[in-house]
Image (cartoon, helix red, strand yellow):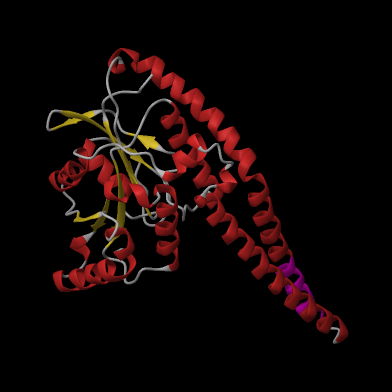
Amino acid sequence: MKLGTEYQHSVMGATGSGKTSFVNMASRSSLRIGTGLESCTAEVQLTNEFTLDGQPVILIDTPGFDDTDKSDTDILNLIAAFLATAYKAGSKLAGVIYIHRISDLRFTGIAKRNFKMFRELCGDSTLKNVILVTNMWGMVTKDVGEDRERELTTKFFKPVLDKGAQLARHHNTAESARNIIRGIMKNHPMVLQIQRELVDDHKDITDTAAGEAINKELKEQIRRHQAELKTVQEDMLKALKDKDEEARQELEEERQKLQEQVNKARMESENMASNYQKRMEEEMRQMQERINQLQHQWDNRPFGGCLVM
């Protein structure tokens, strides 16, 4: 059974990029908003259905891959399990909104990682259903904002724009947010790459493009920390030889922290698949609850939607 005729849109972006504020403004919802760069969106959140130009709409707010409390593997499992469960239930997204702060001085490593994961989740074939949104224009002068926008369109966003994605500015008003959503509502709903990989191709989460990207990063972290461990251990031997107990203790503390980071990265990689299965079971349970609660609204209605990233 399909979930409904709503135009569902997903919103994605870095922690603190204004995803939840955008969602609340467009839908008149009251999802919890974080302060500063502290993450508040710990789960995938759906707004209540609202009407725009006579059409029912639901927005989906997602946590960023730079979450302050959860690892990248946790975030991937949250988003992937939700999307796979929704797709199995007959749901497709009308579009994806990716939000980036124009107030950022540069496209940082964190921003690049978020944008890369967004692309791995969507896949190239669905990019024509994507809108790249810049916000926080009130925090920069017009000239500075336009210079940064030009750099984004000619460099970082160019590969996605070249494949059909749209670019839009959000001016921190409800009407601005709704105009952006209107640019997606006309889309034909499509299946995201992560949904196709998990559901149609029956891939393990670790074998998806997004899973492979995270595992590659984890392996690089392990390699880097092991190299640092080797240096610390060599310094510890020198401190022992020099009978420098204070230096040895400081190095031992550093060694323990590095070893913990290596162990954590290994555990995340090894447990990615099993944790995804647990998350899928929870999503299936929650999905059934939503179906039971809203059965009367959804009978004989086609379904679309929008993810906000």
As rendered, which of 194 and 75 lies closer to the eye? 194
As rendered, which of 170 and 183 lies closer to the eye? 183
**Position of residue 261 measured from the top left corner of the image (x, y, whole percent):** 66, 60
Magenta stretch: give its range.
244-255
* Prevailing secondary structure of the magenta residues: helix
* Left or right, 182 with reference to 280: left
Against 294, residue 245 (above or below) is: below
Q: Residue at x 67, y 67 (%)?
A: 223
Residue 88, visible in the rendered structure = yes
Q: Quadrant of residue 113?
A: bottom left
Q: Residue furthest bottom?
A: 242
Against 2, residue 203 (above or below) is: below
Q: Residue at x 35, y 34 (%)?
A: 92
Q: Residue furthest top?
A: 296
**Position of residue 254 measured from the top left corner of the image (x, y, whole percent):** 70, 70
* Left or right, 164 with reference to 89: left
Residue 18, visible in the rendered structure = no
Q: Quadrant of residue 228?
A: bottom right
Against 236, residue 309 (above or below) is: above
